[in-house]
Structure formats: C-alpha cells, structure tokens
Image: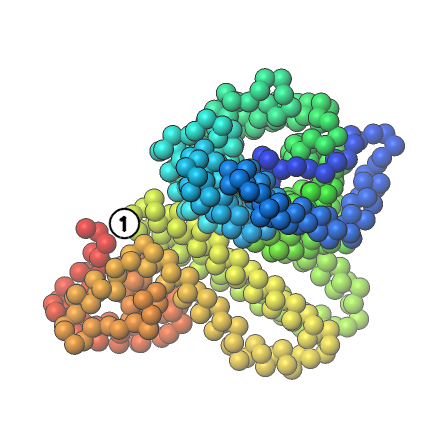
Amino acid sequence: MKKVLAFVILAIICVSGIDCARAVGQPNDDMDNNDLLGILDRMIAGRGAYSEQRRAKADSLKRLILTTERPEDRLPLYLERGVLWSGLSTDSAITVFNEGVNLSRELGDSVYEQLFRVYLSQAYFHRGQVLNCFSGLRQIANEGVHKGVEVPYHHITEVVCYIMGFFSPETENAGAYLDSGLRHAREELKYVVSDSTYRKYCEGQVYLGEGKWDMMALKMNEVINEAPADEKYRGLAYTLLGEYYMRAGDYDEAVRYYALGAIEDIRLANHDEVSLLRLGELLNKMGDTSRAHNYMTVSLENAIKGDMKFNLMRINEAYTDVTETIEREKHDKMSLLSGLVIVLLVLLVLVGKMIVDKRREVRHLRAVEQKLASANLAKETYISEFMNLCSSYIESLEDYNRMSMRKITAGQTDDLLAYIKSGKIIDEQRAKFYDVFDDAFLHIFPDYVSEVNRLLQPGKQIVTPSPKVLNTELRVLALSRLGIDDAAIIARFLGISTNTIYTYRNKLRTRALDRATFEEDAKKIGLQ
C-alpha cells in the first residue's frame, strides 16, 4: 500500500504554479461511473489536443520572453514556462529552469535564482536523478531559504521525501525520509494563507504524513467543495480520495474519484499523472480488462513522452499485470489452437525467467551498493542508476514482448526461435549492464583505474578504451572491491566462465608490484 501511495504522491510535485484548465464539476446523482468513464474515454481519444494547447502556451511564452525588453521582466515568464513544461516534458523543463537560473544570476536576483533551482530539483526527481534533486534542495537549505521561496521549497521537499519513504518502506532510511517529509509539510503551513483552499490541501498532506487517512479525506472533500471551477488542486484531491476509498475497499467510489482525477489530468496534459494508472489497476481487478489495458497503455505512453523515468518502473509493473490478464482471456478464446497456446506459454515462461533474472541482478547491485565506503553518496547514486537500468530493461522487455507477439501472430515462429538462439537480446542487455555498472562505479570511485595501476609494475599497467569505461580485468577487480569474491557470481555478472575469472586474477597478480597483497590492496582503494 505504501508503494501505491508513493506513486500517487508523485503527481503532486508539479502542482504549485500550474495554470489549469476548467475542472469537471462535482459528482452528482445523475452522473454514474459509466457516464464518467465514457467521458474519460472520449477525452483520451482526443488527448493530443490538450497537449498541443499546453505546448502552444509554452511556445507563446517563449515568444513573449524574446520580445520583452527588460531582463527582470523575463524572470516570471521563464518560471511560468518551466512549470508548463514540468508535467509535459522533463527535458524541456530542465532546459527552461536552467535558463532562468542563468538569467537570475546575471541580474543578481537571488530570490528568483533560488526559486528556479527549487523547481529544477523537482524536474531532476521526475527524471529519476534523485541524487541531483536532493543535492539541489540541500544546497538551498544550507544557503537559507529566501523569503517568497518558502512554500515551493517546503512543498517540493515534503513530496520527494514522502515518495522516497513510501516507495521503499523496507530500507533503513524510509522512516527518516517520512519524518523529513512531515516536517516540511508542517513548515509549509507556516507560510500559507489561513482559510485558503491551498491551506486545507496542505493540512491534508500533514494528515497524510501522520497516517490520519480519515482526516486527510475530510480535508480533500473541503478542497473539492470549496474550490472554484478552475482550482488547480481539485484534480489532486480527487486522486487522493480515490486512494482513500481504494484503501477502504469501496471500489465504486474509488473508480468515481480516480476517473474525475484522470479527467483533470488529461485536460491539463499532465504526463506525470497517476490517477489513470490507478483507475486501470482497479478496473483490471474488477474484470474490465479492455478499459484497464487502454488506460495503462496511455499512462505508459505519457511517462515515456514526458521522460518521467521515476514513474516507469511502477507503471510497467501494473501494465504487466493487466497484460497478463488479457493474455489469459485470449488463451481461453483460442483453446482450439493448442499449438499456438503452447508457444505462447513457453514465451511467457521465458519472459518470466528474464524478469526474475533482472530482479536478481538488481538485488545484487543493491547489495554491492550497501558495501561502498561513501554510504550516503553511494545510495543516492545507485537509486538513480538502478531506476535507469530497470527502465531500460523494462523497455527492452516490452519491445521483445511486442516483437514476439507479432512473430507468433504472423506465424513466423521459426524467425522468433532463430532470434532467441542468436542470443542477441542477452548480449544487448549485458552491454547495457556494463554501461550502467561502469558509470556508477566510476562515479563513486573516480580514480579507481589510476589507483589500480599504481599497484602494477611499470609497463604492465591497464589501459582502458575510454576514461569512463572499464575492461573485463577491471570489472573483476571492481566486483571484488564491492565484496563479491565468488568466482561463479562474478562470472554470471560478466557473462564469462569461472576459469576465465581465475585466469584474469592470475595474470593481474603476475603484473603486481606485490603479488602476495595485490588483491587485498585493490580492495582498500577508496577507503582512505
């Protein structure tokens, strides 16, 4: 449940500063769930128009920035344009916020500079760059939050801390993240106008952090009942109420509020939405697999288009569930085609095995992370790298699954078998693993190659193909540095035989200045 909640909270990050379109009215007795879902289906079909409207507004702001003579008058325009891009394209948002930071520095406006950096940290979080996000927020805290920046700073910090705590409740830092999120939620209230709709919304976030679900639901109802038709927090209140009723087991009410939240997200062209995903999960559980699959697909497309890498892992998990449900229904309808069913089952087993293998690799990477000398830096770095790796694996699995389905449907099973036998997909995924491992390891130990070479004889030192790439010898040493000494495990990581591992180790010892202590010396790199 906490992971679900973390995903819902993720949509809240982009709230502050968004100029929303007109919201849907309150639920009434004449509008049942079927009516709401019908409206949602029609809006999904025409969702491109809403995205174009948001892009057009961002482009018009760009033109206005170019024609504005006074540089100081461009700052609010940059901020508005960056916020518009935040829920639509993370890359574009980061570009605009960086331009705002640079202009603020040129003008000596420290308040606007800090405000842009707050939103830039938010954008990094969306893209899965957790280390950059928290680094930026900590730097602002160390500087001292300027007057006028308090609300967005505490709000964004609160939300990212909530997500980190709820998304990984089993980690040792989960409680600290949640406590930090609640502390910032309370701090935010000090700067919010009394009796405003936003204050009620913020009070609901405090109750959320305190685990007081009933009180949170009361506050969200107040937001819905008191907010005008264009109030931007209305859609988020709908989504949180959907989560409240889902938790209580009232699925009909949960569908209603998720649908209202999804309608708001589509009108706003928010690609960081979660209500549509949650609605798809619930409808899948209730047996409406066709709609569930459609909603999941749209949600996945939004995350990919918006470069919301943090969302992709959670979306794919839900998307896989509904896809498997649909596959089971298809199998029942095609029972007479026993041969095809057998092939599909074999493919499902292969895909399942691949998923298990990838998860096992991720668990090994997490174990390696915990043994790094600089613990805090390592954890934040590997969170980002793991998510990028998982996202890449997920996308590859989706491409593989779609290709398999096309080949089977077209009767090209021989082509599919030949592709599987070629081992091309394994080689591609292993190459991606090497890229991520090398990048993460050298990020934590930037001088590792030179330190290893200091342990080797002159003229017998290792030369890498690139400063940011390790060769196989160095990867064997790097895994040992991370506490993995079992040759069989290292061989599985690197895709080579255990005999080859022993060969590499022996060759390295023969080139060492001190053969007896070489391996122990290599393990001490980075401990000083």
Q: Which three-letter amino acid code belongs to the residue tagged 1?
A: Ala
10 Å neighbourhood of mark 1: few (<14), some, or many (≥20)?
A: some
* Residue 165 visible somewhere in the drawing: no
Q: Position of residue 322 (x, y in %)?
A: 68, 54
Q: Position of residue 64 (x, y in %)?
A: 62, 45
Q: Give the residue drawn at x 34%, y 65%.
A: 468
Position of 131 compared to 305: left or right?
left
Position of 488 compared to 170: left or right?
left
Q: Quadrant of residue 8?
A: top right
Question: In front: 22, or 324?
Answer: 22
Q: Give the residue drawn at x 43%, y 50%.
A: 383
Is 162 placed above or below 389 here?
above
Helix, strand or loop for disc 1: loop
Is 107 placed above or below 486 here?
above
Q: Position of residue 487 (x, y in %)?
A: 31, 67
> Which residue of the protein is positioned furthest toward the top in this rendering?
194
Q: Give the residue drawn at x 32%, y 59%.
A: 442
Position of 236 compared to 181: left or right?
right
Q: Position of residue 422 (x, y in %)?
A: 53, 80
Is 89 placed above or below 146 here?
below
Which residue is labeled 1 in the image? 373
Position of 121 compared to 315: left or right?
left
